[in-house]
Image (cartoon, rainbow, N blue to C red):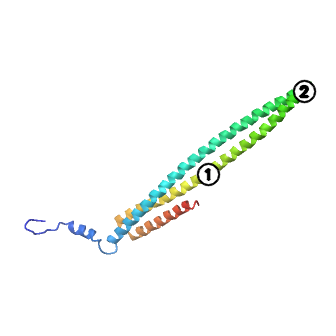
Amino acid sequence: MSGGGFHVHGPHDHELEHAQQGGHGEHGGGMTNQIALFTAIIATVGAIFAYMGGATQANAGLYKNNAALKKTEASNQWNYFQAKSTKQSLAEVSRDLTPKADERVKYQAKIDRYEKEKGEIKVVAEKLEAEATDWDKKSDEQIHLHHRWAQATTVLQVAIALAAIALLTRKKWLEYAMFAGGAIGMGVGILAMLHI
């Protein structure tokens, strides 16, 4: 703008005005607005998918840790079981070698007690092993879900990159590829939500 109310347009003024008004033709502002909206939506959904991927990965680690703890507890029980078996074996040898009948009765009572205790320990150890297996299974399920969320996030990121390229090149086929990528990413995310 010059003095005295006389207005002079610079070379870029027309382009700015054109962009503000949405452009014209096939690849004008409509395409720009459409891609911008698509990118905003897909970026938001991608952020949610990324969060879910991180959460399932953390869960998998926690569940695997729980499995390891249960396996350790089960191992401790089996060691206790083995100690009782050793004591029982020693009592059996003592019973068989002692000449006194009342001593044999005393050792047999110990043998019976050790056998009963071993049965109780075995039940606890097997229960702990089953819990460890259950935690391992839950961890594997969470890792599978993590992979699904990661796949969905990756495809959505590729769709966003295609959107940027479509904006720069104004190629309609890239816009279609962008929408296809977004749809595929959403589909994989739905599979993750359904635990498939």
Location of residue 71 by image quarter:
top right
Q: Which image quadrant: the N terminus?
A: bottom left
Q: Earlier in the sequence, mark 1 or mark 2?
A: 2
Secondary structure under the numbered disc 1 in the rendered image: helix
Residues at marks 1 and 2, CA–CA distance in whole angstroms: 55 Å
Residue 7 point in image, percent of width and height: 13, 69
Q: Residue at label 2? A: 102
The disc labelled 1 sits on which kind of residue?
A: Lys
Q: Position of residue 85 (x, y in %)?
A: 79, 34
In the image, 64 versus 167, the foreground residue is 64
Q: Quadrant of residue 102?
A: top right
Q: Is residue 132 left or right of residue 28?
A: right
Quadrant assignment for the C terminus? bottom right
Q: Is residue 4 left or right of residue 180?
A: left
Q: Residue at x 69, y 40 (%)?
A: 74
Q: Residues within 10 Å of mark 2 (few under 14, many from 20)?
A: few
Q: In this rendering, which labeled residue sits more in front, label 1 or label 2?
A: 2
Q: Is residue 105 above or below residue 56?
A: above
Q: How many marks?
A: 2
Residue type beneath disc 2: Asp
Label 1: few (<14), some (14–19) or many (≥20) C-alpha neighbours in 10 Å: some
Label 2 near label 1: C-beta < 8 Å? Answer: no
Where is residue 91, by image quadrant? top right
Residue pushed farthest left?
4
Outermost residue, top direction?
Answer: 99
Q: Position of residue 155 (x, y in %)?
A: 48, 60
What residue do we see at 81% from left, 37% from top? Answer: 115
Residue identified by numbered label 1: 138
Q: Secondary structure at mark 2?
A: helix
